[in-house]
Image: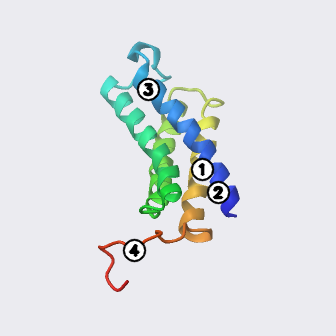
């Protein structure tokens, strides 16, 4: 199960780095979706997507605060719920499938890293953890 989660995490990280990067790099006129959103909000979502992508990979890879991975995935679920709702509000039903699927995969990662196959504890104990 851990391998499946790593593959899904990697694919989602690539997707969100790309999507967030596009929102941060391209001019706002080119990033307009089916429903007009303020420019600052689009940039904010881009930053959140890139940080969420990093949160999917880095904590488990570096074994520093691995409990952040399911939190990053849950944050991306919230973003994808919003993206699906905005896309549906714009009248693009078929286009809403992509953010819905990405949200479901992020929910799978969140649940998987919380319950099914959590990352092992950090390689060295934290100074902040009592009793270790």
- Distance, label 2 to label 1, CA atoms, is 6 Å
Nearest-to-viewer mark from 4 and 1: 4
Which residue lies under the disc numbered 2?
Answer: 5
x and y, in percent, of residue 62 in the image: 48, 57
Residue at the location (50% across, 22% down)? 34
The residue lying furthest to the front in this view is: 124
Q: Which residue is mark 4?
A: 125
Tell me which numbered mark, 1 or 3, is placed earlier along the sequence: 1
Percent of width and height locating residue 7: 67, 50
SS for dot 4 = loop
**Relative vertical location of residue 44 with respect to residue 56 in this rendering, above or below:** above
Q: Earlier in the sequence, mark 3 or mark 4?
A: 3
Q: Which residue is mark 3?
A: 23
CA separation in Å, label 2 and label 3 = 26 Å
Asked if the residue at tag 1 contacts the one at tag 2, i.e. Cβ–Cβ closer than 8 Å, the answer is yes
**Residue beneath disc 1:** 9
């Amino acid at each position: 199960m851990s391998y499946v989660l790593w593959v899904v995490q990697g694919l989602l990280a690539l997707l969100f780095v790309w999507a967030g990067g596009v929102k941060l790099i391209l001019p706002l006129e080119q990033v307009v979706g089916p429903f007009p959103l303020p420019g600052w909000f689009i940039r904010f979502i881009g930053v959140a997507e890139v940080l969420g992508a990093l949160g999917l990979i880095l904590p488990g890879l570096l074994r520093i605060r691995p409990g952040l991975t399911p939190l990053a995935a849950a944050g991306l679920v919230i973003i994808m719920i919003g993206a699906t709702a905005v896309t549906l509000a714009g009248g693009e039903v078929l286009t809403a499938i992509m953010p819905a699927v990405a949200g479901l995969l992020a929910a799978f990662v969140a649940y998987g890293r919380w319950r099914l196959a959590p990352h092992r504890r950090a390689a060295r104990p934290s100074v902040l953890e009592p009793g270790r």
